[in-house]
């Protein structure tokens, strides 16, 4: 059931599992809460919160320049602004691909294609995410080398793909950092472990899709070529082998 929900664009697979476990999904009028439940999207009536999910939905792929002060969940108990508020009126249900926390900004994909979301998100597919980060204070040469070599954090090892110092201000430093991982607040935790508070965090690219000149709070449709390149890149066997 979770695979079906992801494939027809309800949510990425992990989120779909949460929806099922919470009793929010029904098949032919019966609530299902067991992961692995079988269904046929072509013939069964699948509903989320009582609303029928069409089996054949046009795939939508969007790039949003997320502002600070928005969350990337579809519902926030605290009542904070949600990124889907910025795309109201498009006429299609989409979900954010991955997280950018409340205080972070930059490139965020939205889609109704669960397979696409899975390939972008999971580290085993090797899709690179690049961020421009403004930290408080300065990184000395030894600290930069330690970060480039990798850090042992409380939730596991952190090994960035690339770290480059771009600009040094009197009280802050701009750093560009590229990663494969998607652990929550990973970059903030890494710099905090070194004694540096992150002042700004902007995701500028995912794979070879770039934020570019897209204005804050606006969105555009991805080109078919961008979608295809991401899907092809996620299938590259040499990347999967490297990450396994």
Image (cartoon, grey):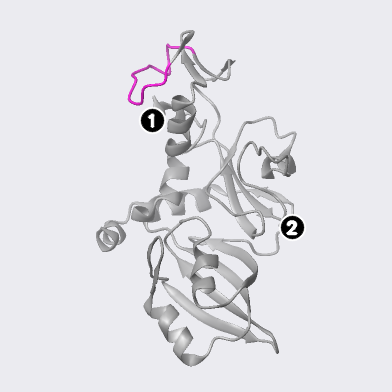
| Nearer-the-camera pick, 184 or 43 | 184
> Does the magenta-highlighted stretch encompass residue 35?
yes
Query: Measured along the vertical axis of the image, is residue 6 above or below residue 119?
Result: above
Q: Position of residue 191 (x, y in %)?
A: 53, 73
- Left or right of 114? Residue 217 is right
Q: Position of residue 200 (x, y in %)?
A: 66, 68
Among all residues in the image, which is located at the extreme top?
29
Q: Which quadrant of the structure image shows residue 147?
A: bottom left
Give the labeled residue for mark 1: 3
Viewer can see residue 6: no
Give the labeled residue for mark 2: 216
Q: Which residues are magenta?
A: 32-45
Q: Main secondary structure of the magenta part?
A: loop
Query: Measured along the vertical axis of the image, is residue 137 above or below residue 70?
Result: below
> Does the magenta-highlighted stretch encompass residue 69?
no
Q: Position of residue 213 (x, y in %)?
A: 70, 64
Query: Measured along the vertical axis of the image, is residue 78 above or below residue 147?
Result: above
Name which residue lies at 24% across and 59% down: 241
Give the position of the C terminus as an image quadrant: bottom left
Name which residue lies at 60% across and 52% down: 108
SS class of the residue under badge 2? loop
Q: Are marks 2 and 1 in contact (CB under 8 Å)?
A: no
| Nearer-the-camera pick, 215 or 50 | 50
């Amino acid at each position: 059931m979770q695979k079906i929900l992801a494939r027809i664009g309800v949510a990425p697979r992990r989120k779909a599992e949460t929806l099922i476990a919470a009793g929010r999904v029904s098949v032919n009028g019966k609530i299902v809460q067991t992961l692995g439940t079988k269904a046929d999207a072509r013939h069964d009536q699948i509903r989320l919160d009582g609303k029928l999910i069409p089996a054949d939905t046009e795939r939508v792929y969007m790039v949003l320049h997320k502002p600070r002060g928005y969350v990337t969940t579809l519902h926030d108990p605290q009542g904070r602004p949600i990124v889907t508020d910025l795309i109201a009126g498009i006429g299609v249900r989409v979900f954010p691909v991955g997280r950018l926390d409340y205080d972070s900004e930059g490139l965020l994909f939205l889609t109704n294609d669960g397979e696409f979301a899975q390939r972008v998100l999971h580290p085993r597919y090797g899709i690179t995410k690049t961020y421009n980060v403004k930290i408080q204070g300065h990184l000395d040469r030894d600290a930069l080398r330690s970060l480039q070599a990798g850090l042992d954090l409380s939730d596991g090892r952190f090994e960035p793909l690339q770290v480059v110092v771009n600009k040094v201000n009197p009280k802050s430093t701009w750093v560009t950092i590229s990663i494969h991982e998607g652990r929550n607040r990973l970059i903030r935790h890494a710099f905090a472990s070194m004694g540096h508070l992150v002042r700004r965090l902007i995701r500028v690219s995912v794979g070879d899709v770039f934020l570019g000149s897209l204005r804050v709070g606006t969105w555009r449709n991805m080109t078919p070529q961008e979608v295809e390149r991401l899907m092809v890149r996620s299938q590259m066997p040499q990347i999967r082998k490297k990450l396994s």
